[in-house]
Image (tube, grey):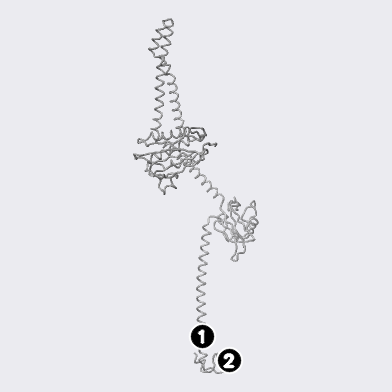
Amino acid sequence: MLQGLKGSVPGSAKDPPWDTGAGGETGEQAWIDVIQKMDQVYTDLVQSQTQLEMQNARLEEAQAFIGSVLSAMTDVLIVSDLQGRIQQVNRALEMLTGLAANKLVGRPLNELFHSSTFDPVVKFLEKVRLKEHLADCEITLASADGQGAPLAVNCTPRHDHKGRLVGFVIVGRPVGELRRAYRELDDAHQRLTRTQAQLVVSEKMAALGRLVAGVAHELNNPISFVFGNMHALKRYGTAIKRYLDACDRLIRAPEPELQRLRRELKIDHVLADITPLVEGTLEGAERVSDIVQDLRRFSSNQEEPTELFDLSRLVRTAADWVVKAERVKPTIEFDLAEPFEIASRRGAIHQILVNLVQNAVDVLAGRSDARIRISGETDGRLVAIAVADNGTGIKPEHFDKIFEPFFTTKPIGRGTGLGLYISYGMALKLGGNLTAANNADGGATFILTVPVNDSL
C-alpha cells in the first residue's frame, strides 16, 4: 500500500502531505506513527469503557445495597427537598400509608400528616436552616386505616456534595411500638424488683434456718430461769400461807410456838430470798423478750423505725447467735466500748453483723486456730465495726465480685452468694458503707460503717 501511495502523481491534490518525493522514507514513517497513535487511542478507549462498566456495576451494587437497607428498616424514612416535596421514601412508610413509592415521590410533605398536626415543612425547615436537629417530635401520620399513626420523629438537614443545604431527612418510629417497648421494659423491671425482694426474704429465711439451734439454746436458758423461779415462788407461797393460817389459829397461843413454826418453815429465809427470785424472773423474762424482738426484726420485711440501742450488746448478741449454732466454735475477741449507744435501725445492723460473722465462721471451718476479732471505733459522726478473721483472705481477682449477687466461693449447696450482696445494700440504705480488705498477717476484714445518729 505504501508503494502505491509513493507512486502517485506529484503535485496532485491526492498526494499525501508527507510524501516529499525524496525516497519516500519520511512519508512512510509518518504513516506508521499515525497508525500507532490510533492504536493507542483505541486502547485508551477500551480501558475507559472497561472502567466505566466497572464503576457502573459498583454503582448498581451500591444502589441495590441502599435499597435493601431502606426496605429492611422498620423505622419510617422520608427524604424531602427545601420546597417540602417528597424525594424518597422506604418500605415502612409505604406499609403505613398504603401507597407505593411512585405514588408518594413528588407529593407535598404536608399531605402525609393529619391537619391537626403542625406544619412539618415550616417546623423542619426552621430547624435545619438553624443547623439544629429536631429530636423525638411527635406527629400523626395519615395511615391506611384512616385512624392515623403517631410517630416519634427526628429531622436532620441534608447537603449535596458541595455542602449546600438541599433538603432534610425525617426518620420516625411508631409511638405505639415505643410505648409497648416501654411497657415491656417496665414489666421486666417490676419482675426484677419482685425477684430481688424474694431473694432477700429467701436469704433471711436461710439465715434463720442456720441459726435455729442457737436461738433455741438462747431461749432455753432464760425460760428455765423463769420456770425454776416460779416453782420456788409457788412453794414459798404455800409456806407463807401455812404460816399465816397458823397465826390465825394460834393467835392466842404462846409466842414460842410461833417462833418454832417460823424456824420450821424458814420464813426468814423465804422473805430474804423472795426479792432476788422475783428480780431474776424479771431479768429472764426481759432476755426472752429481747431475743424474740431481735428475731422478729430479723425476719420482718417491713421498714423498721430508728431507735436508740446499745451497739456493743447488739454485736455480742449477733456473734452469739452464729457461734452457738456451730459444732466447733471459733474464738471470738471483742474490742468494743461498753455501753455504746447509737440511733439507727437495729434489725438491719443486726442482720448485717450476723451475715459478716457467719461468713467469717464459714471461712474458718476446719481450722483448729480459728479466731474472729470484732472491734469498733467512732469519730463522733460515724461508727465503724470491723469483723476480722485469720483465714485465707480474699483472692485479688475476687475483690470486684464479692458484693455481687450469687457470687460465692463456697461449695454448691453451702452458699447462695446473697449474704454479702444483701448486707452491702442494707449498709447503703442506712447511709453507711460495707468494705473489705485483706489483713497484713493473713485473713480478711469486713468493715461496716454507719451513722451514729440516723435521723431518717
Q: Nearer the viewer, mark 2 or mark 1?
A: 1
Indicate the secondary structure of the residue bearing disc 1. Answer: helix
Residue 320 horizontal/vertical position (percent): 41, 33
User: Position of 244 compared to 8: left or right?
Assistant: left
Checking the image for residue 23, the label placed there is none
Percent position (x, y) of residue 348?
Answer: 48, 36
Q: Position of residue 343 (x, y in %)?
A: 52, 34
Q: Nearer the viewer, residue 232 or 310?
A: 310
Picture quadrant where residue 106 is located: bottom right
Quadrant of the drawing holding the C terminus? top right
Q: Is residue 181 above or below residue 226?
A: below
User: Tag 2, which secondary structure?
Assistant: loop
Q: Is residue 142 above or below residue 456?
A: below
Query: Is residue 28 toward the left or the right of residue 365 in the image?
Result: right
- Figure disc tally: 2
Q: Amino acid at mark 2?
A: Ala
Q: Is residue 23 above or below residue 96?
A: below
Horizontally, residue 159 falls left or right of residue 233, namely right
Circle 1 residue = 33
**Picture quadrant where residue 164 is located:** bottom right
Residue 23 percent across, percent down from the top left: 51, 94
- Name the amino acid, label 1: Asp
Q: Is residue 385 visible?
A: yes
User: In front here: 409 or 40?
Assistant: 409
* Residue that carries the numbered disc 2 in the rendered image: 13
Distance from disc 2 to disc 1, alpha carbons, whole Å, reads 22 Å
Closer-to-camera residue (105/364): 364
Asked if residue 390 is positioned above or below residue 249 in the image, the reply reads: below
- Indicate which disc, 2 or 1, sits on the residue closer to the N terminus: 2
Q: Nearer the viewer, residue 89 or 21?
A: 21
